[in-house]
Amino acid sequence: MPGVRRARLGGVGGVAVLFLSSCATPLVVSPAPHAADPNCAAVMLAMPDTVGGLARRATTSQATDSWGDEYPIVVRCGVDVPGPSTDTCVTITTTGYTADWIVREEPDAWIATTYGRNPAVEAIVPKIRADAAVDEVLTELTPPASLAGTTGRACVGLGDAAAASPSP
């Protein structure tokens, strides 16, 4: 009988491992076109363990990160560097770090891309997380994003209505 007990416990343990591993499924994220840029390594290594109160989740591609299981926040380093734009451009300064972000509103998400940085970093924040989450997320992502090199461009104009253009 003791052998039977061990076999049953082993079977339960095997099911628990299978169940736990299914919760840790990496999020499928397409890599950005310039994900292999060596400067993305420093940016991605500096990403926080939590963003918007959500825990980090593994992804399937180089230079990507995500937080949360349902409606995840996604970051990709190495997206195309944006040129001057009339999209909303905001400057985020936090704890000695500054980054400009071009913010576009899509039907289901806010998409923010660093402006004046190379490699450029993109953050996708689902709208279901609320409009206020965009500011919080960008504040948390500004320190690592600011590790990318600068291009000499910056947000100019009046606050959130500013257009992104070359700095003087």
Image: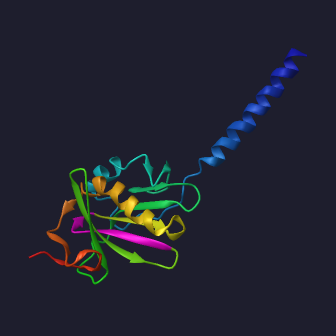
> What is the quadrant of the C terminus in the image?
bottom left
Which residue is at a point 41% across and 60% down the rendered structure image? 75
Residue that protrudes farthest toward the right in the picture = 1
Residue 50 shown in magenta: no
Residue 126, x across and y down, in percent: 50, 67
Which residue is at a point 21% across and 69% down the rendered structure image? 116
Instruction: Choose between 122 and 119: the one closer to the eye.
Output: 122
Residue 117's place in the image compared with 147, above or below, is: below
Which residue is at a point 57% across and 55% down the rendered structure image? 69
Residue 73's place in the image compared with 48, above or below, is: below
Residue 87, x across and y down, in percent: 31, 81
Residue 157, x across and y down, in percent: 19, 79
Instruction: Choose between 61 and 106: the one closer to the eye.
Output: 106
Instruction: Choose between 150 and 26: the one closer to the eye.
Output: 150
Q: Report the magenta residues as a range.
A: 109-119
Residue that protrudes farthest toward the bottom in the picture = 86
Is residue 120 toward the left or the right of residue 71 in the image? left
Residue 5 position by quadrant: top right
Residue 167 position by quadrant: bottom left
Residue 110, x across and y down, in percent: 44, 72
Magenta stretch, main secondary structure class: strand
Residue that protrudes farthest toward the top in the picture = 2
Residue 97 position by quadrant: bottom left
Colour scheme used in the picture?
rainbow
> What is the quadrant of the N terminus in the image?
top right
Instruction: Choose between 91 and 145: the one closer to the eye.
Output: 91
Which residue is at a point 54% across and 57% down the rendered structure image? 27
Is residue 80 toward the left or the right of residue 14 in the image? left
Residue 119's place in the image compared with 164, above or below, is: above
